[in-house]
Amino acid sequence: MSDTAKLAVGGKDTDFPVLHGSVGPDVIDIRKLYAQTGEFTYDPGFTSTASCESGLTYIDGEEGVLLHRGYPIGQLAEQSSFMEVAYLLLNGELPSKDDLSTFKNTITRHTMVHEQLATFFRGFRRDAHPMAIMCGVVGALSAFYHDSTDISDPEQRTIASHRLIAKMPTIAAMAYKYSVGQPFLYPQNDLSYTANFLRMTFGVPAEEYVVDPAVEKAMDRIFILHADHEQNASTSTVRLAGSSGANPFACIAAGIACLWGPAHGGANEAALNMLREIGTPDKIPHYIERAKDKDDPFRLMGFGHRVYKNYDPRATVMQKTVREVFKAMKVTDPVFDVALQLEEMALKDDYFVEKKLFPNVDFYSGVILSAIGFPTSMFTVLFALARTVGWVAQWNEMISDPAQKIGRPRQLYTGPTQRDYVAIDKR
């Protein structure tokens, strides 16, 4: 392919450089488009626009590929741990044993939150949604940790990154505890990142909480599968907020707010509600026919993906994990039977095959989280907890990018042209 692309505008041809990534589509560099042609591009949702250069995550939606720093998500979910994936995303390479031990120790030592934050929680209504609490508390962290908000200092950026990753499980668990009226539990340093979160969420001071290894493994996998997903809406929000020079705590709070939207972080809750609505396997054919009817508002939630036009590689791991959790916890749930049979029937149906409506990660994650004991209001909180690693890594990459500028999308203006003000008594 030529290293330039030619654009004809107003009878004038203009050449633009074509940039090549290490893998994936080439991109046409249109940074000088307005200066050279006086025109902008129009791309609602920025679905055809590369907003940045990144070496973190690669997705090939047609082939169902998801790579973190080059490593397939399936291999990481099966063989790695969330802390190892976090290190990989932050540092670019898998850690040595000593590196991982040091990183785990650093994160563990940052898991406690400022004691005054407990008072901050009590300012929320008892029935507040946990995501509302997360937005407020994470945004307020900059008021408690002044020593890590100077984004021009690499050391402060590192400290802020570690603090965010470490404190997010504590804040998430506190949000849950507050909503159910139970006392907060402090972190316990001899537990893993994931086990610590489970204990802070489900443990009580009256008795010792024993972490189920199968549940811990399942949660760790869920965290890995949600750690990063390229330039999605919330990640783009974090980068956009960061491009203005906002402190890292504010940027992550902005990402949480974006993730709260049902079109982004609420998909697993919608999928679980759908499975519960179907109720029993014998009703599946009826609902499949409803999904095919364009005049029926019912849609199969958890099928298809904005990016993946093939089987979501994360769903394969999730399907295996849900079996392990149900077996370990001796759970019998008709929702699980509905999920398995619905997937099997949909994958054999020409309508879904032709439209490439394959199960995605949300199809199973809600079932797993519900079996573990999380209410649906916590699903997006868990998503935010895991995605914080990706947000922080993306934020760090953006800050270090010399080509980064403050985000400033343009628009196609369709409002009134210039007109003169008319006095109120003459209107």
Image (cartoon, grey):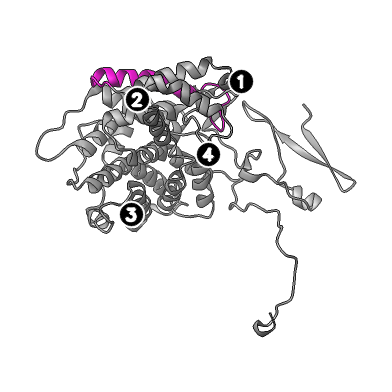
Q: Position of residue 377 (x, y in %)?
A: 33, 42
Front residue (pair 37, 315): 315
Q: CA distance from mark 1 to mark 4?
A: 26 Å
Q: Position of residue 125 (x, y in %)?
A: 27, 56
Q: Which residues are magenta?
A: 304-332
Front residue (pair 213, 96): 213
Q: Position of residue 177 (x, y in %)?
A: 23, 45
Q: Secondary structure at mark 1?
A: helix
Q: Which residue is mark 4?
A: 232
Q: Which residue is mark 1?
A: 354
In primary-sequence order, the first of circles 3 and 1 is 3
In primary-sequence order, the first of circles 3 and 4 is 3
Q: Amino acid at mark 3?
A: Tyr
Q: Position of residue 282 (x, y in %)?
A: 40, 19
Say if the magenta span includes residue 306. yes
Q: Amino acid at mark 4?
A: Asn
Q: CA distance from mark 2 to mark 1?
A: 26 Å
Q: CA distance from mark 3 to mark 1?
A: 52 Å
Q: Which residue is mark 3?
A: 145
Above or below 142: residue 101 = above
Circle 4 Cα neighbour tier, 10 Å, few/some/many (<14 / 14–19 / ≥20) = some
